[in-house]
Image: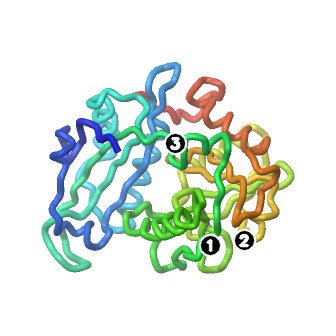
Amino acid sequence: MQYPDWIWHNGAIKPWAEGTTHVMSHALHYGSSVFEGIRCYDTAQGPAIFRLTDHNRRLYLSAKIHEIDIPYALDQINAACREVIAANGNTTDYLRPVAYRGLGGFGLSAETPVDVAVATWKMGKYLGDEALSNGIDACVSSWQRFAPNTLPAGAKAGGNYLSGTLVAREARRLGFGEGIALASTGLLSEGAGENLFLVFDGALHTTPVSAALLNGITRNSIITLARDAGLTVVERDLPREYLYLCDELFMCGTAAEITPIRSVDGRQVGTGKAGPVTRRIQDLFFGLFDGRTQDRYGWLEAV
């Protein structure tokens, strides 16, 4: 990975190599961090961050769940995101705001200082350069998502992503592009780090937030854009076998964007390539950045 020159850390832009924390920081030992993943796109009006404020609002909601008191206001974190992009001179970056319990105490309930950083780097296509056009092969993981009232899936917290790491690494080890997790109920949840959409007879079906998944910003954007375009969207519980029966299937997320899935567990999905509804959703989504789709909701926030 090629690292950028600058990072925003605890209130100031500093050289990337100086964005450090102690090895005994609370977050390193207990996963006590919350974060966001945000993309900046080049648009006809200049570089714009996609749903910056919505992402960072969720950062504060995640922090509220875990009683992590972020020592900066929302506007300051938004400004930090713009500042670090400008400092690195990039316009198509991935942003990572993170707030975490730092050094200052030990034990699960220890009160420690909360450190905050905003990093940015060139990510490219998360699941591969050709994934958006050709799709990926996925598998259902042997690892399930956590049960209700154990870990709050609605928080984008560092510790939660140990689950996704297990799912993703198992999939890669078995030769698949990504893994899909079931909830503790045995019903569909989400991908290792992506939400799921299945297409039946032209309608989009997606698993509900009660299925141990993160209510993704991209997921919400797709639901909104699809309904605006006259497509039917259904949020419902879905059994595993529907992965094999649907006409089309795709994953979505800030990193994955809209990635078609051409097979699951070796079973071809639909025609084995992105179908018409998936392509329509890709056009609507990426159209926000090249002007084909009107930004009716003010999602593009200028750098």
Dividing the picture into quadrants, the one containing residue 80 is: top left
Q: Which mark is residue 240?
A: 2
Q: Amino acid at mark 2?
A: Arg
**Which residue position is annotated with label 3?**
125
The furthest residue to the left: 104
How far apart are the alpha carbons under marks 2 and 3?
Answer: 27 Å
**Which quadrant would the C terminus be assigned to in this image?**
top left
Q: Residue at x 72, y 58 (%)?
A: 263
Q: Secondary structure at mark 1?
A: strand
**Seen in the image, is 46 located left or right of residue 228?**
left
**Seen in the image, is 19 located left or right of residue 269?**
left
How far apart are the alpha carbons under marks 2 and 1?
Answer: 8 Å
- 167 or 87, which is in the foreground? 167
**Seen in the image, is 244 located left or right of residue 182?**
right
Q: Amino acid at mark 1?
A: Leu
Q: Is residue 198 above or below residue 223?
A: below
